[in-house]
Amino acid sequence: MMFFFGRGGIVGWGSICGCLTSAAGAINLIGDRNQTSKLQDEVMTWYTKAEFPQYQPAGLDLATTVANSTLCHVSVTTWCQHTGIARGDSKRGERCAGVTADTAAFVADMLNQEFIGDGYTPKYAIADSVDQCMSCHGEHTIGKDDCVPCHRDAH
Ligand code: HEC
Ligand code: HEC
């Protein structure tokens, strides 16, 4: 229940995808600050690049999309536009449940590698635009999501 607020990107605001708030929270319970930051960076980056949803127990054969963002708004809207399935449709609920399961599995695997195995080595790189744009805008700007989708018309 502690993370139930995350649904719809915090009670429907379309802000951060709710499975990322809970993933980051679960990671935070274990390990030191360097370990938790590394694993939280990794789940955020992985999320932006993953083809969702992989886990589809209802057998609906739902199409998958890549969000290229950590925002619920972008993730859900991209998928609904691509599939033509409405936000209120129960299939969309199945999609987001699948995304949550995919994220839980990814985090469990990372935690096992970090704390039981030989240590987790990050595999997903933050978008190139972030370093590039931040070299000039870093003084006043915060963020690690790809800058370009929201600022295509800048410069
Ligand atoms: C070489 C330095 C430099 C780089 C690299 C750079 N910018 Fe800028 N950017 C500027 C400057 C200078 C301005 C103008 C500042 C002003 O008007 O106050 C600006 C303005 C902007 C603005 C506001 C005005 C507009 O055109 O909409 C946005 C948004 C922006 N940049 C986004 C980006 C993004 C996204 C990237 C990476 C893809 C990027 N910038 C890379 C220097 C840079
Ligand atoms: C989810 C969408 C989104 C992402 C991702 C994003 N921005 Fe923005 N950014 C905005 C919005 C919305 C504003 C405020 C409205 C505006 O000025 O465009 C803004 C404002 C800015 C401004 C000030 C613009 C101005 O007019 O002075 C800069 C510079 C900027 N962002 C740079 C970046 C950089 C660099 C990144 C990547 C690290 C980034 N943004 C990622 C949405 C986004």
Image (cartoon, grey):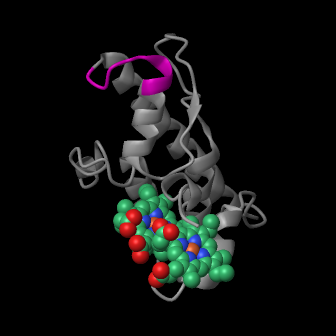
SS majority, magenta: loop
Q: How many marks?
A: 0
Q: Where does the image place residue 111, in percent across and percent down from the top left? A: 61, 59
Identify which residue is drawn at 57% across, 42% down. Answer: 105
Residue stretch rendered in magenta on the structure = 81-88
Foreground residue, 10 or 74? 74
Q: Where does the image place residue 56, in percent across and percent down from the top left? A: 52, 21
The residue most toward the bottom is 139
User: For ligand 2, which image quadrant applies?
Assistant: bottom left
Q: In this image, 127 relative to 3: left or right? A: right
Q: Is residue 23 magenta?
A: no
Identify which residue is drawn at 31% across, 18% down. Answer: 90
Rendering quarter of residue 155: bottom right
Foreground residue, 90 or 75? 75
Q: In this image, 118 relative to 87: left or right? A: right
Identify which residue is drawn at 62% across, 61% down. Answer: 42
